[in-house]
Amino acid sequence: MGVDAGHLVGFSAEHVNRKPIKPSALNPGDTVAVVAPAAAIERAHLERGVNVLASMGFRVKVSERVLARSGILAGDDRDRASELQEYFADPEVKAIFSARGGYGCGRLLPLLDFKAIARTPKIFVGFSDATFLLNALVDLAGMISFHGPMVAMDFARGLSPRASEHLQGLLGGKLDGFELEARETMHKGSAEGEVIGGCLSVLVAMIGTPFEPRFDGRILFLEDTGEKAYRIDRMLVQLRQSGALGRVAGIVFGAIRAIDGNEQESRMIARFAAEQTAGLGCPVLYGIEAGHGTENFTIPFGVTARIDSAERRIVFTEPAVTR
């Protein structure tokens, strides 16, 4: 089922100049699948989240393997990859939701057949550790993916009414565009490009691998949680020294929550973010409501957006699905 690294590099190049495919809109009554590509899941959390999905009007298909355990992971790597592959191929399934993050998605990348996935594009939603999958789906399968809430985490805890309405409107094709406001403009300017990114620590782990995202001319979204300020700085330094930050059109930070929510650490993280993105010649916004510790508004990756630093907004200028 898998493909080797050399093949992946060539396959990625095929998509460089091709706009990612938009999946079909998700409507009430459609079947959605819940997968566990990363860490092991608690049954109670899963059940609460599944009930929320069902209350939105969807038929929910949950695999028998979703509660499997292999150490800290939700089962064997090949089983998790096979399950994800099967749901992409299943014509009944219109969207796939990640149950939770934690750790484990990166182990699946060499085991997935992205060419096969590209033949059946559909909505995939997740964040945090799912950053591995979100960016690979855009670059290796050539399809839009969705950085958004997860079933046994955000859904189980309770989405805000605004975030829930946004998610359903975005996936249902009711939003031709939308915008998110940042707390501050770190560096002025304007830019337009496809959005990629996600959890900072995961993106850094992708650098130098066959699955490294293409940064050129794109808007890079970054967020993270539970990190010391010096670690955030270290990761941003790596992104900058690798050349990634110098190739993007613009940067938008979501939440970067300091360990234990320490205010002094939070201020230092913001300072490091400003320092490591200075002199790049691109606009940088800080603090939109997306990612850990926020309302976690869903962001489509692979969709074109525009940064308006004067208004402190990132504006998504096209629908993310086809109606």
Image (tube, grey):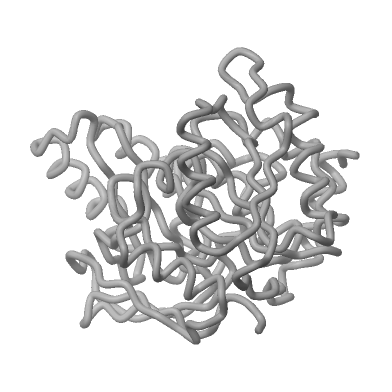
Is residue 51 among the parts visible in the rendering? yes
Nearer-the-camera pick, 295 or 235: 295
Whole-percent x and y of residue 125?
57, 55
Instruction: Please state, as top left, top right, bottom left or bottom right, where the N terminus lies in the image.
Output: top right
Q: Position of residue 266 (x, y in %)?
A: 16, 41
**Is residue 231 found left or right of 214 in the rendered image?**
left
Using the rendered view, name the quadrant where residue 233 is placed.
Answer: top left
Which corner quadrant holds the C terminus? bottom right
Q: Residue reaching furthest left?
A: 264
Q: Position of residue 209 (x, y in %)?
A: 67, 40
What residue is rendered at 83% in x and 46% in y?
86
Q: Is residue 204 visible?
A: no
Residue at 72% in and 29% down: 65
Between residues 61 and 262, which one lies in front from this camera angle? Answer: 61
Residue 171 left/right relative to 280: right
Q: Identify whether 37 is placed above or below 90.
A: above
Q: Most extreme residue toward the right, as rendered? A: 1
Where residue 153 appears, x then y in whole percent? 43, 40
- Above-or-below relation of 197 to 3: below
